[in-house]
Amino acid sequence: MSGEHPATGTRPRVRDAAGGASAVAHPNIALIKYWGKRDERLLLPWTDSLSMTLDIFPTTTRVRLAASAGRDEVLLDGVPARGEARRRVVAFLDLVRERAGLSRRAVVDSVNTVPTGAGLASSASGFAALAVAAAAAYGLGLDATGLSRLARRGSGSASRSVFGGFAAWYAGPSAGPDREADLASFAEPVPAGGLDPALVIAVVDAGPKAVSSREAMRRTVATSPLYRPWADSSGDDLAQMRAALLRGDLEAVGEIAERNALGMHATMLAARPAVRYLSPATLSVLDGVLQLRRDGVAAYATMDAGPNVKVLCRRADAHRVADAVRAAAAQGAVHIARPGPGARLLGEGEDGR
Ligand code: DP6
């Protein structure tokens, strides 16, 4: 080994001429869902989860240390961030500064290509890119595991976007000191033998969601009588998912993913008051997926904190699935994604897209 850095290319701590660092990260879609935190401050989940990182919708983020004191400057898609979005980025930078022993403010410029707030996990690519860029700009010198732990503190699912392909994020032991709990909760790659999958994404509604996933998770854990049973069964789902991925069994991967997602939505529907992300258009796409299976096409659905549907299928079937889903989704856009790369630092002049 040449001291190569797994998630960040060949040179750790790469800074550009102006002392900044840029990184790119892609969203991931969970096949075994993360739903529910046991620690809101450290962002520790109740359950392990497993996802596929996509090859579309990257987020590119540049972090530069500011010359003057004052406040952090945060631009999201060229517009100064406000409210909760800004608060989360600044809290994340505070964490990085604390670790680096530096107090300098930062200028963050983040460009997203995924429709924000549409249940398409822009927070995963966003905080994975921010973690990689900020760690480099502040000289933290973290390895991929360290970057995954750090990204987790921005958004739980971001821990998985540090890695390409399939990745599992460990909840870690549910009791013990904070430091040990923090160290034990990170993602790592999961081997998948001979699988050539695609995820067909039906964007049935690209608008922002009525209830944030953070709030919905909190309410589900606190009030849903179905939360515990789902969390318990999710552990079995994950073990079976790993085995199915390893033998490249797309049908089993799809079946497990679909039941895990429907179970997660059942926990929310049973929360008090209920959280319902699934819309009539979602159900119509789900009917389309059932019809595909009746027609002999291996297609399986998963949904996150929003009405959009992601359909797992073989790469060779992706266009047929996209056509069926497009018909069912009426007006919505349809995208085809394949397994994508992990987060990485960008060289100077590279834009990551
Ligand atoms: C439904 O990672 O966005 O997409 O940790 O509060 O930022 P926070 O939540 P986030 O939640 C993702 C939930 C999910 C399932 C998943 O990606 O595993």
Image (cartoon, rainbow, N blue to C red):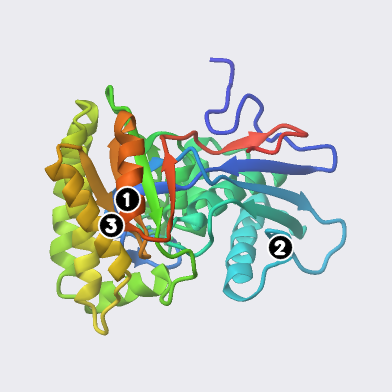
Q: Residue 128 placed where, x, y %?
A: 54, 48
| Kind of element beneath mark 2 | strand
Relative side of 162 to 259, left or right: right
Amino acid at dot 2: Val
Q: Which residue is mark 1?
A: 325
Q: For the residue carrying disc 3, how many other residues have a C-alpha within 10 Å: few (<14), some (14-19), or many (20+)? A: many
Q: Are marks 3 and 2 in contact (CB under 8 Å)?
A: no
Q: Quadrant of residue 135?
A: top right
Q: Are marks 1 and 2 in contact (CB under 8 Å)?
A: no
Question: Residue 74 has which mark?
Answer: 2
Question: Residue 40 has which mark?
Answer: none
Amino acid at dot 1: Val
Label 3 beta carbon less than 8 Å to ligand 1: no
Question: Residue 285 has which mark?
Answer: 3
Residue at far top of view = 1
Residue sitting at x 83%, y 65%: 69
Report the front residue among 91 and 225. Answer: 225
Q: Residue 192 placed where, x, y %?
A: 29, 28
